[in-house]
Image (tube, grey):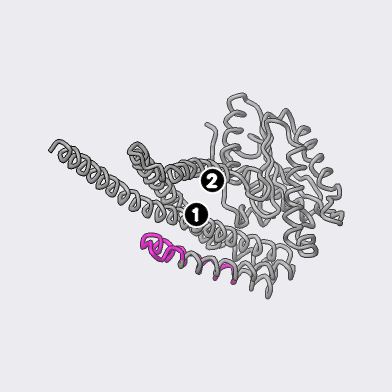
Amino acid sequence: MLFGRIRRTVVVGFVAAAAAVVGFVTAAVVLSLQLQADSAQVARTREIQREVERFATSVSDIGAATRGYVVTGDADELADWRTALVHVRASFDALHALTADNAQQQRRLDELGDALRARLATSDRIVALRHDRGWDAARDEIRKGAYLIEMTRLRLLIADLQLEEERLLARRERQVVITAERLRTLLVALGVMGVASLVPMYLALDRLLREQESVSTRDAELALHDALTGLPNRRLLQDRLARALVAARRARAQAAVLFLDLDGFKAVNDRLGHDAGDLLLGAVAERLTASRRGTDTVARIAGDEFVVVLADVRDTADVERVGAGIIDAIAQPFPIGSDAVGIGTSIGWVLYPDDGRDAAELMRRADAALYAAKRAGKGRLRRWSADIADASPAAVDPARGIAPLDAATPG
């Protein structure tokens, strides 16, 4: 009888343990499936973010190509404009497909589509006026205001779309971490119960969590830096410039903004291909970084355009010395594969607080000075002055399709 009671106790114990294991395993399977679904949502959201960035770049390219064609009347600029139209429409269609299951984003895209069609219609009208009636007619059309208003509306809608996707990504990444933590805790309990076969799964899950943390850190870093050159992007430039202006105001000092555009880069890109063009941009970034002082910032904001922020400037000679050094550095041949590539750079610059009181104004006027430098023969260093404010196409649309820096008035 005692043996029977022991046997029954053992059987009941094993059955109870088995039932507990089955329950734990079932819960683990459910959480594993949930983790896969959550991870897929994160991947999809990142894909949408990349597509939004491609769309924003294509919109910027349309602005740049429109601006370039209005200024130069060059057939290559017109071809670039047509190519940008194809890209922006393809990117918009891709966004529609990727967000098909998100009604809120679909509504945003509908509004964005209306703004895009209005922007393209105005751009087409300006290009047609430049082609048929010349620079003055195109400039007058731009100055009517619709061009800038439509671009501003389009940028705001794109920024709204990007912000919503960033929030969605943050929520979904957090959900991945929560689900993974629950699954890891469950597997710990199973391990305590002696289910040794699940130890490899626990270790793999632990590795997944560490990788997720690493990816989140890397994504945060990439969000502030240009993927091609590793330089600060427009978002980080905005922060650095605002800090430089605040520091200059407090110290009653000066700061400078240099707006650079490469001369001859498009010809190299067309002749050697985009891969060689990417290598060239990376090499330019290295030379610009080597030319800067420790407190200065070098950023790539679009295509072959760079911005240098000089902090703690003593006088204009400081800026001219740095600018001349940059022009000399870029003028040296670049070894790209078996070729020695020669390009140049034009620079427009402004001095804070003499030439502007906030970041937006300084960027706008540095851009205007850049266009004046390029129209004077390229390879020039030109400071902004009131006499070029209205003559430059940049004064009509300061950003030329580039997302503007928010005004950051230092006090």
Task: Specify the amino acid type for callout 1.
Answer: Arg
Q: Is residue 108 highlighted in magenta?
A: yes
- How far across and how far down the image is residue 253, in percent? 65, 27
Disc 1 and disc 2 in contact, CB within 8 angstroms: yes
Q: Is residue 166 visible?
A: yes
Q: Is residue 114 visible?
A: no
Q: Is residue 139 highlighted in magenta?
A: no
Quickly name the residue at label 2. 219
- How far across and how far down the image is residue 292, in percent? 74, 36
Circle 1 — which element? helix
- Please tell me how crowded label 1 is: few (under 14), some (14-19), or many (20+) other residues with Cα within 10 Å: some
Kindly identify the residue that appears in the image at 61 percent across and 24 percent down: 251
Name the residue nearer the viewer: 192 or 226: 192
The label shown at residue 46 is 1
- How far across and how far down the image is residue 329, in percent? 82, 43
**Chain part drawn in magenta:** 98-124
